[in-house]
Image: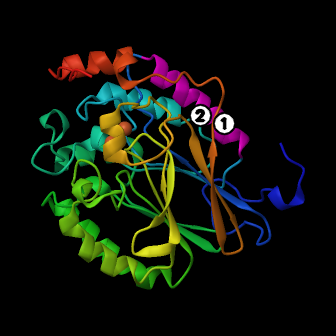
């Protein structure tokens, strides 16, 4: 606990916007890629440690940017295990879906699992809405479902209509924007639905973003931590959040993700006035395994009938 007057919290859970003292530093925590399994194991233990860390930071809002569950979007028992662990977060919590929670768009989805209306509905039943707008002090925090873009599902058109309404709704307030996959890949050849948003949807989304005072974009999915200037929005920071579950250290993954830190952790966005600064936070006692070393992940792969590619 801190005694610094600037860090005193006055808000109550569920009422994020109203009670925040105008002068204090607000803190929004992004947690991502927890990959929690019904089988327990490393990823669950790391998620529990991450939640202890989040509690110590006394956030005004926590945003989980997806891949809540281990691998298979059709395993309800993984969702139940994840919900039990995430329920220990005392601050207001928003959860966005990742490709391992609802499937993904594109011609070659992981495990052959495309995003479907049924999978989106199963996610919402456990974790709530897959998009949100929250007012936090003088700021707004927006989250959207990255896996719908290019899916052709009715939920995609619903989300577009909601996105189109945002500029007027936000009214010029400084805004942080969260999604599972990054809006922009680090290189044009990776601007595909497996890595980021599909290049085909960017012009429509960027036209909306150009009318929003976005100060930061937080995403997950890449399992590494990196800070860059947001392409086409150089005054905004793009944050690739670290996972809490496991890392990828191969040269091939580094080509896909671009430069970054392969470490487990969370991101704390500290906001004072109209300034935001993201900070990497971690714990020395995270068990930092590579994907292929995580027993629950290998068993989930096996159950999906997928062989781990060599290397
Ligand atoms: Fe992930
Ligand atoms: Fe992902």
Drawn side of residue 151 relative to residue 178, left or right: left
Q: Is residue 304 above or below residue 155?
A: above
Drawn side of residue 180 relative to residue 234, left or right: left
Quickly name the residue at label 2: 50
Main secondary-structure element of the magenta-colored stretch: helix
Magenta residue check for 55 = yes
> Which region shows up in magenta?
40-57
Q: Is any atom of residue 274 visible in this view?
A: yes
Residues under numbered marks 2 and 1 in contact, where contact means CB atoms less than 8 Å apart = yes
Report the residue at 18% width, 23% height from top.
304
Quickly name the residue at label 1: 53
Report the residue at 36% width, 57% height from top.
186
Residue 13: x, y in percent?
A: 64, 53
Residue 95: x, y in percent?
A: 44, 48
Magenta residue check for 232 = no
Q: Residue furthest left?
A: 107
Q: 13 or 287, which is in the foreground? A: 287
Q: 214 or 59, which is in the foreground? A: 214
- State the quadrant of the N terminus: top right
Q: Dot 2, how many residues are within 10 Å of its Cα: few (below 14), some (14-19), or many (20+)?
A: many
Drawn side of residue 99 relative to residue 223, left or right: left
Helix, strand or loop at mark 1: helix
Q: 94 or 195, which is in the foreground? A: 195
The tag on residue 153 is: none
């Amino acid at each position: 606990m801190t005694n610094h007057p600037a860090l005193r919290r006055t808000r109550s859970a569920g009422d994020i916007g109203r009670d925040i003292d105008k002068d204090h530093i607000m803190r929004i925590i992004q947690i991502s890629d927890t990959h929690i399994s019904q089988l327990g194991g490393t990823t669950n233990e790391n998620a529990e440690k991450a939640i202890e860390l989040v509690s110590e930071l006394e956030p005004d809002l926590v945003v989980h940017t997806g891949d809540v569950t281990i691998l298979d979007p059709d395993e309800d028992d993984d969702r139940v295990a994840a919900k039990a662990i995430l329920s220990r977060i005392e601050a207001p919590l928003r959860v966005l879906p990742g490709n391992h929670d609802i499937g993904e768009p594109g011609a070659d989805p992981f495990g052959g699992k495309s995003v479907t209306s049924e999978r989106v509905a199963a996610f919402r039943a456990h974790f709530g809405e897959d998009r949100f707008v929250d007012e936090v002090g003088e700021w707004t925090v927006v989250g959207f479902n990255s896996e719908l873009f290019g899916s052709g599902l009715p939920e995609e058109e619903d989300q577009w209509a909601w996105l189109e309404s945002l500029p007027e709704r936000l009214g010029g307030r400084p805004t942080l924007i969260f999604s599972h996959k990054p809006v922009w890949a680090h290189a044009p050849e990776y601007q595909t639905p497996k890595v980021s948003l599909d290049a085909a949807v960017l012009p429509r989304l960027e036209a909306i973003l150009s009318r929003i005072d976005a100060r930061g974009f937080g995403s997950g999915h890449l399992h590494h931590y990196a800070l860059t200037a947001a392409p086409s929005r150089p005054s905004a920071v793009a944050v690739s959040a670290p996972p809490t579950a496991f890392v990828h250290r191969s040269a091939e993954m580094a080509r896909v993700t671009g430069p970054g830190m392969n470490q487990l952790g969370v991101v704390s966005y500290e906001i004072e006035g109209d300034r935001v600064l993201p900070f990497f936070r971690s714990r020395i006692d995270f068990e930092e395994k590579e994907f292929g070393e995580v027993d629950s992940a290998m068993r989930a792969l096996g159950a999906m009938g997928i062989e781990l590619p060599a290397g």
